[in-house]
Image (tube, rainbow, N blue to C red):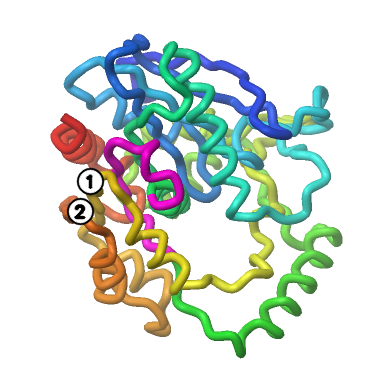
Amino acid sequence: MYQVLRPAHSQRVTLRSQRYHLRQWGTPTPDRAPLLLVHGWMDVSASWQFVVDALAQDRWVLAPDWRGFGQTRPLHLTQPRHPTDYGEADHYLFADYLADLDVLVDHVNTELGRPADAPIDLVGHSMGGNVAMMYGGIRPQRVRRLVNLEGFGMPATRPAQAPGRYAKWMDELKALHRGDLALKAYDDLHGVAQRLMKTNRRLPLARALWLAEHWAARNADGRWEVLGDPAHKVTSALLYQLDEVLEVFARIAAPVLAVEASDDSLAQWFTRGEYTLAQYHERLRHVPNCRTAVVADAGHMLHHDQPQAVAGLIEDFLA
């Protein structure tokens, strides 16, 4: 089992309609911007542990479990029926993550005795990277520096796709309520670890076992369930509006570091060529102050594959 170097402690905070689980490392320092780490889809805040352990300097680092993931639950859900009981929501809106992050920044700054809109350092992976990039342009005064780890966005869409997208959304809502989208349960912790290693061929067993304890929880039958709401599998009813995204990118005031892995994740996800790495790089041209970096010998979960390299890039950029 992986041995943690910098233990985290948990805090529960009320953000909008949610009782957010917030993982924290280090000591708060009012004269230094807090560092917020936001995880990706079907992931949890503990995913950042390896990077935090690899940081050369101690600083106050915070990572939330997004709504519908990990230990974050709706306020009214004081006694979940099972580990993955996330309430009655049957789909999630991307905009809610932006609003949650905005209130979280208020909370973090208030905890430090700083003005609520004081700038923070923001790092996001995958879905979290997409949230971070959008937040950086919507609230430019609130982000000092921004690191995007493989938050590529989505393929551009066309208005003609709207009827089919709405129909797909409604069909998937029915499938969810039938139980067709339920996440697989595992007999033991090793089964969860093997699942993580199947997705990420570079993940060592020791790290996989440690992650498995935070990525899943035991249910009443003794089996392990992934800590994510199956409703996240429902496709958004709304088309991805690239023109809007680029307008937001153009308003990012913070310096941005866009980090990608040496494996081409986009080619793996969008096999029909509907969105390429070259197109992603073209989008980054709309960000006023953006540099890029590549982590060698890494896939999409680059913060698991090469935590030392990722931590080094983050620290050098945030200095």
Magenta stretch: includes residue 156: no
Q: Left or right of 286: which side holds 172?
A: right
Q: What amino acid is at disc 2?
A: Asn
Judge whether 78 appears above or below 267 on screen.
above
**Which residue is rendered at x = 25% and y = 15% of the image?**
58
Label 2 element class: loop
Judge whether 40 appears above or below 162 on screen.
above
**Where does the image place residue 23, in percent across and percent down from the top left?**
49, 22
**Which residue is rendered at x = 45% and y = 41% of the image?**
39
Q: Are marks 2 and 1 in contact (CB under 8 Å)?
A: yes
Question: In which image quadrant can residue 176 be found?
Answer: bottom right
Q: What stretch is highlighted in magenta?
A: 137-153
Identify the mark at residue 129; answer none if there is no mark: none
Q: Name the residue under label 1.
A: 255
Q: Name the residue under label 2.
A: 289
The residues bearing labels 2 and 1 have C-alpha atoms spaced at a distance of: 5 Å
Work out whether residue 218 or residue 144 is closer to the camera in this orientation and state it. Answer: 144
Question: In which image quadrant can residue 161 be found?
Answer: bottom right
